[in-house]
Image: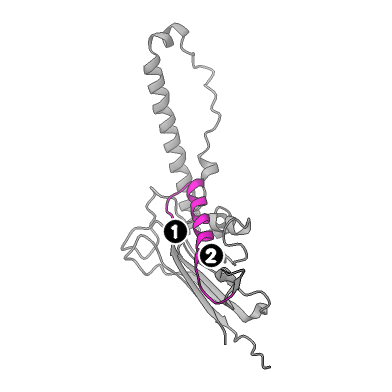
Amino acid sequence: TTSLCFVSCHLTAHEGASMCRSRNESCAGILENAKLGALRVAGKYLDVGHQFDHCFWFGDLNYRVDISDLLEAADDAPAAADEPPSPKKLERQPSKSAAHAEKAAKAAAKARREKAIARIVAQARDDDYAALGARDELEREVRAERALAGWTCPPCAFRPTFKVARGEAVEAYQTKRVPSYTDRVLYRSRSGLAAQSLRLDEYVSCPGMTSSDHKPVRAAFSVAPAPVHFG
C-alpha cells in the first residue's frame, strides 16, 4: 500500500521578520507534535515527513513577499541651499523641531512603502514571477532550511493570491498590504522512494473564485504505487 499524509494549517499573519520566525516555529511545532503514523524512536514519534510515503502541506501559510530592503531609509543629505537652523533657534523650539522631524520621517516611510508596494503590484500585473519569487519568504526559508527542511516548495507561476478585492476575477490588489503568495502547497516523499513515484502535474491559482480576499490555489499530483515486498 501507499501511505499519504495531508497537513493543512493556517499560520501567523502579518509582515516582518518576527512574524516570519513565528511561522517557522509553528511549522516546526506541527512536525514535532503531530502524533501520526506508527514509527517511533526511543518512544518518540518521527515527524510526519518521515512517517508516510508522500506528504502534502497546504493552507494559508501567510508567508509574504519581502520588501524590507525597499523600506530602508536612504541617506538623504540636505540640499546645499538649505540653511541649517541656528543653535539658538533650536534651543527655543526643541519640541517643535522634534515633532517636525518625526512627521517628516513618517511621511518619508509612508512614501517608501507606497512606492515599494506599487513596484510589487506592477510585477504581478506584468507576470514577472521570477522577480516576485526572489522576494518570497517561504521559498527563502525552505531553501535555508529554517522551515520545512527537505520539503519541496514549488515556485509560483501565477500572480500573488493575497490581498485581493472581493468580487473581482482579475486580481485587484488592496495596496495596504504587500501582494503575497500566502496560499501554498508543499510536498515531500519518504527517503528511498524513486523520484518518479510522485509528480507535480499542476500548480495554479483560481482567480475565478471571488468570495474572499485570497485567491485559492490547487495542485494536482500523479502518485505511483509503492513497491510491494513479499517475504
Residue type, mark 2 in image: Leu
- Quarter of the picture holding the N terminus: bottom right
Taking the spot 39% from the left edge, 49% from the top edge, the residue there is: 175
The residue carrying pointer 1 sits among few (fewer than 14), some (14 to 19) or many (20 or more) residues within 10 Å by Cα, namely many
Say which of 93 and 5 sits in front. 5
Residue type, mark 1 in image: Leu
Taking the spot 31% from the left edge, 63% from the top edge, the residue there is: 167
Which residue is the site of mark 2?
31
Horizontally, is 100 left or right of 22 in the view?
left
Residue positioned most to the front: 43
Q: Secondary structure at mark 2?
A: helix
Report the span colored magenta. Answer: 11-39
Say which of 198 and 207 sits in front. 198
In the rendered image, residue 123, in percent from the top left (x then y), is placed at: 50, 54
In the rendered image, residue 164, in percent from the top left (x then y), is placed at: 38, 58
The answer to which quarter of the image holds residue 186 is bottom right
Magenta stretch: residue 36 in it? yes
Answer yes or no: is residue 127 visible.
no
Which residue is the site of mark 1?
11
Question: Is residue 148 depicted above or below 219 in this figure?
Answer: above
Front label number (1 vs 2): 2
Residue positioned most to the top: 88
Taking the spot 54% from the left edge, 54% from the top edge, the residue there is: 137
Answer yes or no: is residue 155 visible.
yes
Horizontally, is 47 left or right of 112 in the view?
right
The residue carrying pointer 2 sits among few (fewer than 14), some (14 to 19) or many (20 or more) residues within 10 Å by Cα, namely some
